[in-house]
Structures are given as C-alpha cells and as structure tokens.
Image (cartoon, rainbow, N blue to C red):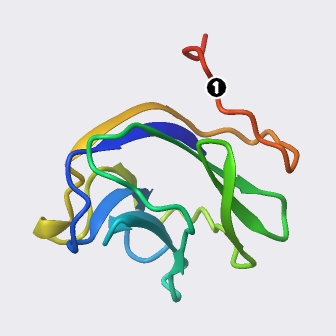
Amino acid sequence: ISFFFKPELSDATWRMILGKRLGQYNLYLQGGYLKWFPNGSNSTQLSIPIVANTEYHVAIVCDGTVTKFYINGQYAGSTSTMITAGASSEFVIGYGDYGSEYFKGYIDELRITTSTTTDTFTVPTTAYTS
C-alpha cells in the first residue's frame, strides 16, 4: 500500500486514513502519529511525527512475515502481525466506524499492489502512470 496524504488536523481524535472495517486492519492518525491496528489487535505507533498541513508519503510493505512502514522513504516501524484481507468488510478511505473518525485532509496516489520491495524504499517523485 502506498499513498500521499496531507492532514488538515493532527489532534487527539482518531482519524481513520484507510483500512478494512470491523477490525481487519486500519491506519489511523491520532495525537500526531500514525497508528496501525492489524486484525483488531493492539496498535503499533509509527515513530515519525505527523504535522498538520504537511504532505507525507506512506508505504506499507508486507513480506509474508513482517509488515514494515515507511514515511517519506524513512523506516518508521514494523510489526509481525500480518494483514489478512478478509472479504467480510469493505476497504474504506478516510472513513471509520464512528462519526468522529473521518480523516480531514487530502489523500492522493493511493496504490495497492502485490509486488514486493526491498528494505530501501524510494519515495515516488512523479505521478503514477497507468
């Protein structure tokens, strides 16, 4: 999963950026940090702070054992909890299960692929082509 985002707010409210609803996996912005909730389990807080009105690139990379996170090409954390893409709920962007969880800002160039990458991740500098 790869995308750019620019939050208008970076407050204490949980702001869902993307995920599979009903506890499958969710990426939130809360308290100035991105937080990953895989399979309804405990969250992993990523190490790079997020500031309102600043654009960031995020990459989430799964290698079959570990899920790694990159913000602007910089390693931001990992978890051994893998993504399970169950069919029981829809994939959502900017919308959570509760009314206060709406993401306020911009999300662009969202890309979901099955390709692999290495430990060195290069942030895209041009728009994706079809």
x and y percent of residue 91 in the render?
Answer: 42, 53
31 sits to left or right of 4: left
x and y percent of residue 105 in the render?
Answer: 24, 42
74 sits to left or right of 95: right
Quadrant where the C terminus is found in the figure: top right
Callout 1 environment at 10 Å: few (<14), some (14 to 19), or many (20+)?
Answer: some
Q: Say which element carries label 1.
A: loop
**Residue 73 vs residue 35, the one in the foreground:** 73
x and y percent of residue 90 in the render?
Answer: 40, 56
- The image quarter containing residue 122 is top right
Q: Which residue is the extreme one toward the bottom?
A: 42
67 sits to left or right of 104: right
- The image quarter containing residue 77 is bottom right
x and y percent of residue 98 in the render?
Answer: 17, 72
Q: Which residue is the extreme one toward the left?
A: 99
Quadrant where the N terminus is found in the figure: top right
**Residue 42 vs residue 87, the one in the foreground:** 42
Q: Is residue 36 above or below residue 2?
A: below
Q: Residue at x 46, y 36 (%)?
A: 4
Q: Which residue is the extreme one toward the right?
A: 118
How many numbered marks are there? Answer: 1
**Residue 4 vs residue 10, the one in the foreground:** 10
Q: Residue at x 43, y 77 (%)?
A: 23
Q: Which residue is drawn at 84% across and 44% down?
A: 120
Mark 1: amino acid: Pro
Which residue position is annotated with label 1? 124
Q: Which residue is drawn at 22% across and 74% down?
A: 12
- The image quarter containing residue 63 is bottom right
